[in-house]
Image (cartoon, rainbow, N blue to C red):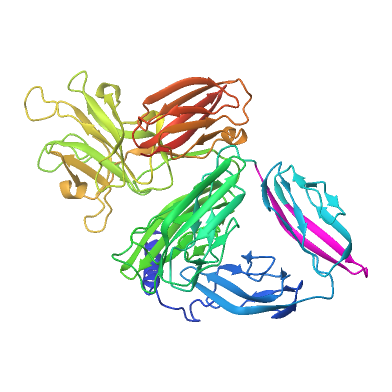
Amino acid sequence: MTFRQKLIIVILVLLTISSQGFSQKNTKEDLDAAFIASIYTITAGDCVDFTDMSFGSPTFWQWSFPGAETITSEDQNPTGICYYTAGVYDVILEVQNGSDIDTEVITGCITVEENTETPIANFIADYTTIPVGGSVNFTDISQNGPFVAYAWTFEGGIPNTSNEETPVPVAYTEVGTYRVELTVEDEEAVQDQEVKVNYINVIPAAVIPPEANFMADRVFIEPGDYINFTDMSSGNPYIWDWYFEGGFPETSDQSDPTGILYAMPGEYDVMLIVESNMGIDTITREDYIVVSETDPCVTFPIADFSASQILIRSGTTIYFEDESLNNPTSWSWYFQGGYPTYSAVSNTINGIEYNAANFYDVSLAVNNACGSDYILREDYILVFSGPITEYCDTITNIGDDEAIYSPAVGGTWGYIGGHNGQKTRIYAEKFDQHSFEQIDGLIIPVVEYENGGYNSEVTFYIWDGNTTYPEEVLYEQDFYLRDIPSNFNYPINFTTPIIVDGPFFVGYKINYVDTNSDGVSDDIFRVSIAHDRDYTSGVNTLYVQTNGTWATATERFGIKTSSAITPVTCLVDIEDFQTENNIEIYPNPASNIININTGDLITGQEIHIQIFDQTGKLLISDKNLTGTDIISYDISDLPSGLYFVNMIVNENKVTQKVLVTK
């Protein structure tokens, strides 16, 4: 896709989304949720099929069936929704397309009449999600007995069958999802069977304490709207307790509650308590849900987002979270190569699946009553067909059809990209990228060098790129000019990768040594740049510092250009060795203590542990033994920032990032 095509898409998206007010309702020409049921009055124990009749080409469906055995569904046309208890029940359908979201609620949609005649087989489990090795107690809640015979089948369970009304606890020793069946027979030999597919979810046993976390699909809604929540906790919890201030229902024990109704305006807390075999954790997000009849904006939004992963294997589902500023109230996502391709919620709590190996763009347009904003991250998601733990590539701001050169500075001596009469001391090239998370090295296209003194130096830098000009230094190192060859792409390899979070600057600082006082530097060092890209329409990514003041190359030299410096950038996934052996570092973020659990490694092996800061400075070096005890380090004296923990066992090395916050 060309830049012009992407620009047209951006304009169309912004025009579409900016026309939608916070309180505006959709028309059937846009998006309108609607559905029909196969039957509206049933007898307890019967099932209903639902058919989506929505307008506006929805791409995603979220159903809620209060009172049914199946509480939620993401199928377009759910079938076999069974009701076992007499009553009158609502049905809720939420649909999405690329730019909007709409909800249809039919109050009292399904009437379930009492069945007192024939058997209705049914049962419940005390837990439907358990750690491997755990057990489940099943309770028969069948109706219209008494029953003279019971036949249970527990797929994957030990035992796997029972003929008792209350079976003994059933153990599950393998990770997976399993069906449970119950057949009952009454005194007149009339039978009924209940089959619950994927009813028992057996997860890996936790090796670290859980850390509670969650996302809501929307955080700004109108009164009477519904919100869906997804558990994002780490540490394999299997018990959830939710508390929704101002919501209905007020509580839930589901991992991913859906259809939480907020009827009244206000700002409401959400609390989640999670529990595993390793402990309990709680998170409360104060004033997380804002319910308002009017758009609460004070200024236009600034679009931003993050993904749970960006280097993935094909077939993986990942999650995107809106991190936009200034309270957007509508969202329009585009996931190139993903399914679904579009979303209109703030957070994609149901995930986006990528199946084909490739590099994919992600974009987000946000809107409130004050204005709109848009962000496009090109090649943000990297999908590979097989296992991969690291992907590296060089990136450049030089176009495929652009030539590089080293032009002179007009009206004075010297060169743009090196020493000159304006005494430009620092050159910085900005890379506005989000695909890679670390820089492993630089390739410097050196045109010429000359060292005026034996110890003449040039300093190479990497700065954080989330500011207008370079401010926060992530890396700096001096090199002797005498060691750098001319007319050569000079490589610099970092012993410890430099971690970046989005955009960054790469550049160099030069000194003006003038031993003979002729006004011309005795040092010479210059790097290639791109030809001028036309003053009116070209793109400039080169920044320069003269007399302590930063400016663009356009402001300083009257051209729009880029430095030909090429960073070697990498994206690193969790190493297979770490995953296979359940090696864990926690908490993360940390403040005072870092704990290392050596997982399933053979007890008594020597493990070499190193902790580095972002500049590669070694802060802690220690040797220990693997085993059942947790290895802990006091980091209370470390300032806030990103650190690297290296763990070396035999010839295997694991590196994990740890964020320290105070």
Decide if residue 221 is in sight here.
Answer: yes
Q: Is residue 112 above or below residue 645?
A: below
Which image quadrant is residue 488 in?
A: top left
Q: Where residue 375 appears, x then y in whole percent?
A: 38, 58
Q: Residue at x 11, y 36 (%)?
A: 421
Q: Residue at x 72, y 71 (%)?
A: 85
Outermost residue to the top: 454
Which is the main secondary structure of the residues drawn in magenta?
A: strand
Q: Nearer the viewer, residue 567 or 25?
A: 25
Whether the magenta-drawn stretch holds residue 564 is answered as: no
Q: Residue at x 11, y 25 (%)?
A: 514
Which image quadrant is residue 460 in?
A: top left
Q: Nearer the viewer, residue 334 or 425?
A: 334
- In this picture, residue 423 sits left or right of residue 525: left
User: Which stretch appears magenta?
Assistant: 178-204
- Quadrant including the N terminus: bottom left
Q: Is residue 384 above or below residue 424?
A: below
Tally of marks: 0
Q: Where residue 337 appears, x then y in whole percent?
A: 53, 57
Decide if residue 35 is in sight here.
Answer: no
- In this picture, residue 294 sits left or right of residue 164: left
Q: Residue at x 29, y 22 (%)?
A: 483
- Quadrant including the C terminus: top left
Q: Where residue 335 appears, x then y in whole percent?
A: 49, 59
Which image quadrant is residue 426 in?
A: top left
Outermost residue to the right: 188
Q: Where residue 445 appears, x then y in whole percent?
A: 31, 35
Whether the magenta-drawn stretch holds residue 184 is answered as: yes
